[in-house]
Image (cartoon, rainbow, N blue to C red):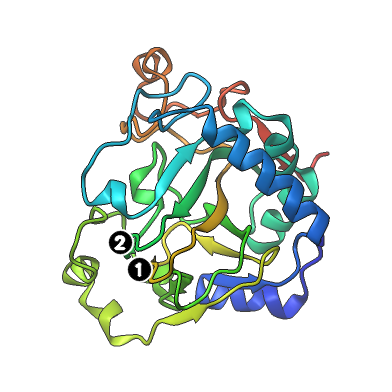
Amino acid sequence: MKTQLTQNQIESYRRQGFVYHPGLLSASEVAELKAAVLQSTATMGKQKVAGGGSDLEEGESYYDKVFTQRLNLWRIHPVVKRYMLSPELGQMLCGLETVSGFRVWHDQALIKEPFGNPTAWHLDNPYWSFYSRQSVSIWIALEDATLANGCMWFVPGTHALATYENVGLGGNMSDLFNVYPKMATIDPVAVPMQAGDCSFHNGLTAHGAGANMTRSRRIAMTCAYMPVGSTFNGQRNILPKAYFDSLQKGDVLANNDWNPIVYTTGQ
C-alpha cells in the first residue's frame, strides 16, 4: 500500500473535508482485496452485517437498490482485516485528523449493481453510535469508478457546516439540502477513480454518488474509523444487541473485540 500523504493532501483534506489519494493499492493488492471482498459477501446471503452484529437483512426498498451493502467483512476474512486494520493506514488517518488514535468502526463493501439507484447526499457520522467531528472513512475503488457507473461526489467544506442532523438514503437526492440550505450553494466535486485509488472523507462531509448507468458492477470497499475515546450516543447502528444493551450514553466505546484499535501514536 502507498500510505504516504503529502502535506498538500493533508491541508486539502482539512480544508475541504475530503482528499483523493491515487494508487493506494497496486494491481496485485487490488486483485487480492477484491477477491476477499467477493468471497466474503458471497457467504452472507441477504445478511448485511457479518460476525455477530445486528440482524439487518437486504430487502426490496429503494435503499436496498442503491447498492449491495455488506458490513464488517474484517470479522470473517483475514485478508480484509489485514487491509482495513493496517497500522500504516491508521497512521494516515492520524495525519489527516489531529487525534492520537483510531479504532475501526465498521467496514462495508458497497457494490453498485448494474443500473443501481443513485446514492442521495448524506452525512456518515450521524448514523453511527458515537458523534465526532474527527471520524474518517476511506473509500477504495476495486474496479474503476466513473461518472457513468456512480463514482463518489463530495461537497467541499461541508464538514465545517454540518451538525448531527441527517437524512436517509431515499429517492430524493437533495433532501440533505433542506436540512442544510447553505450546502446547496456549494458546487460538488466528482472524484472518478481507477482501481486501487482511494479517497478519505470526514464523517460530516456531504457526499453521494450517481446511478450506475452501465451493465457492470461498481465494486468498492470502504471502512469507517472512530477516534479513540469516542463515547456512546444512544444509537444502536450495527452494534450487537448484548453490547448495545450494556451501554449507557456517555460510555467510552472501547470494546477491543468489536472496535479494535487500528493505530495510536503510542505504538
Amino acid identity at mark 1: Ala
Q: Which quarter of the image is occupied by the C terminus?
A: top right
User: Is residue 102 toward the left or the right of residue 130 in the image?
Assistant: right
Q: Which residue is drawn at 40% across and 76% down?
A: 155
Q: In x, y percent, where is residue 3? A: 80, 60
Above or below, comparing residue 249 to residue 16 in the picture: above
Residue that label 1 marks: 211
- Please give the name of the residue rendered at 62% of the width and 25% of the height, measured from the top-left corner: 76
Q: Looking at the image, which is closer to me, 20 or 92?
A: 20
Vertical comparison of 219 with 265: above or below = below
Specify whether residue 100 is in view: no
Mark number displayed over residue 117: 2
Residue 125 seen anywhere in this rendered image of the structure: yes
Q: Nearer the viewer, residue 132 or 204?
A: 204
**Which badge, 2 or 1, is on the more N-terminal residue?**
2
Q: How crowded is mark 2: few (under 14 residues within 10 Å), some or many (20 or more)?
A: many
Residue at x-position 55% and y-position 76%: 192
Up/down of 226 relative to 78, above or below: below
Q: How far apart are marks 2 and 1 (CA)?
A: 5 Å
In the rendered image, the quadrant that contains the N terminus is bottom right
Residue 144 point in image, percent of width and height? 60, 68
Res 262 → quadrant: top right
Q: Which amino acid does label 2 sit on?
A: Asn
Tell whether label 1 touches label 2 (CB within 8 Å): yes
